[in-house]
Amino acid sequence: MPAMIETQGNALTYETIQAGAGLEAALAMSRADLVDFVRDSDIRGRGGAGFPTGMKWGFCAAEKADQKYIICNADEGEPGTFKDRVILTRFADLVIEGMTIGGRAVGATLGIIYLRAEYTYLRPHLNEAIQKRRGQGLLGRNIMGVEGFDFDVITAMGAGAYVCGEETALIESLEGFRGEPRNRPPFPVVAGLLNNPTVVNNVETLASVAAIFAKGADWFKEFGTDRSTGYKLFSISGDCEKPGVYEFPWGITIAGLLEEVGGEGAKAVQIGGASGICVPAREFSRALAFEDIPTGGSVMVIGPERDILDVAENFLEFFVEESCGQCTPCRLGNPQMLQAVQLLKKGECPPRFLADVKALGETMMIASKCGLGQTSPSAFLSILAGFEDEISNRAPSA
Amino acid sequence: MPVTQQDQLRADLIALVEKLGPGRSSLIPILADVKRRFREVDSESMQTIADALDIHPVEVYSVASFYAFLHGAPEGRFVIRLCGTLSCDFAGKDAIAEALTDELGVGFDETTSDGLFTLEWASCVGMCDQGPALLVNDEVHTRITPETAREIVAACRSAAATQEG
């Protein structure tokens, strides 16, 4: 797969983890201890929302049901994110192993990798990895000889919808419906796929859980900050010399990250993809961590010659296209914000309209049903706040 | 012996539903398969799928029209999806779009009159470090230049000519 090999970056911890080590360690523990172990590592979801993984597993483990599921969210659709593609390509074993440990911990017998349609070319590779593990007795019945430990993994395909990265929309899609997010509660850990308790974890979360079992919770906690433990994979692209997938401990500053990738001259970085925030150069001392700027790892470097309004326009075009249309704030709000940006570009945006749209964006963040509509105004609002001079220079003089 | 697309589809569906199960969750894999095979999902096919899964055809339409990769409209043998997101934009996607529309003689969301190509925008295809990027059906191409974009089109044309041989 030449396209993946080409992705550059620094050395990844995953390279040092032996496949099988995590599962072996997990099987030496009692089932109840597995959840506590994950909780003790303080790992939080790597997809962007940052929900504590141990807590999620604990909720699901506490449910009584005949059938539970572990879903690996490989619907990596956030613009500027490609670390899951690299993980699935190079470390599929670790991902499947994380799912297997999850199955043991919560009492699930089936795992599903929900792979985005744009990554269809990865499916044969994943199916091969699954098949190989079945042959090694690492999936299937009585895994590693443990009586009654049954767990299998299958792959399922997305069909081109960004919103399906949202866990309840993903479940709707797996059930054969439009990928429209559900009301929560109930959360998937209580009533997920086919109404059964379901854990939905990001690709990177699962791979990292396998690594934590292999190396220990204390080892993991040596990386990062008190409130953001461990390391994180960042997908870095845009105006820098060395784009790629990089591993850094949580807490690295934007300036520190830019130095590593040759992007020092940037005037801004977009953190967290289209749904993230745009950080101007004067704030590059800020840290990437749950306590400062939380992120799923998308970092898009914006060079000094770029028009910041082009950035806002690109993201808003994306959201107008990808809004599922179910709830009104998101369906109607995104086109309004796009219109405002296009008027601003022409220097024709009346200040009153801009103020209204800004207020509308703030309302969307509260009133939208799911994460898509709640975060789609972030880039727009942070650009308005962070680049007032650049924007107002084009405002109509009258 | 099946002669029309519908006969063929019905025969294929029986096999497919047998494999995937008659449950609602088979709907998206079925639509993907029909799309791959016939490059469209017309209303007769939707009716056939609905019958096989025992749901209303409106349900089938509703799902097909929701997903970018499943919409029912006829598509070319090669669907070219150019990534439109920021990093590919910075890397020069506009020049690629120009080369493709010029080479194909159609705009975005259009299909060439010979039925070979459909040109679409894609949301991020996850190749942000190697943009501009595009998909040709399931295959990903990166670091595209206007020249390589034209070469990709030419390669598709000659592959099609060879198949028809």
Image (tube, rainbow, N blue to C red):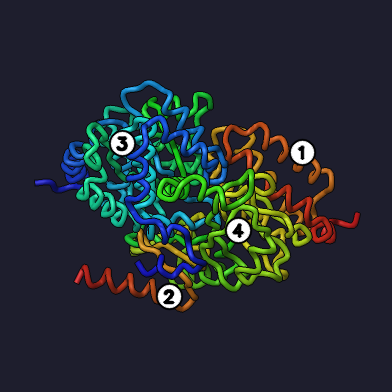
Q: Are marks 1 and 2 on the same chain?
A: no
Front position among marks 2 and 4: 4
Give the percent coordinates (x, y) of residue A158.
Answer: 39, 45
Give the percent coordinates (x, y) of residue A201.
Answer: 45, 41
Q: Which residue occupies the foreground of this view, A317 or A61?
A: A61
Q: Which residue is at the far top?
A: A64
Q: Residue at image x 84%, y 59%?
A: A389
Q: CA distance from mark 1 to mark 3?
A: 45 Å
Chain at numbered mark 4: A
Is label 4 in a helix, a strand or a loop? strand
Earlier along the polypeptide chain: callout 4 or callout 3? 3
Earlier along the polypeptide chain: callout 1 or callout 3? 3
Give the percent coordinates (x, y) of residue A52.
Answer: 54, 37
Q: Residues within 10 Å of mark 4 (few under 14, many from 20)?
A: many
Chain at numbered mark 1: A
| Residue B150: mark in rendering | 2
Q: Is residue A173 above or below residue B82?
A: above
Q: Is residue B2 above or below residue B56?
A: below
| Residue A110: mark in rendering | 3
Q: Which residue occupies the foreground of this view, A258 or A18?
A: A18
Q: Give left or right: position of B22 versus A271.
A: left
Q: Say which residue label 4 marks.
A: A299
Chain at numbered mark 2: B
Q: Name the residue type under label 2.
A: Arg
Chain at numbered mark 3: A
Q: CA distance from mark 1 to mark 2?
A: 46 Å
Q: CA distance from mark 4 to mark 3?
A: 34 Å
Q: Which residue is at the far left?
A: B1
Q: CA distance from mark 2 to mark 4?
A: 31 Å
Front position among marks 4 and 3: 3
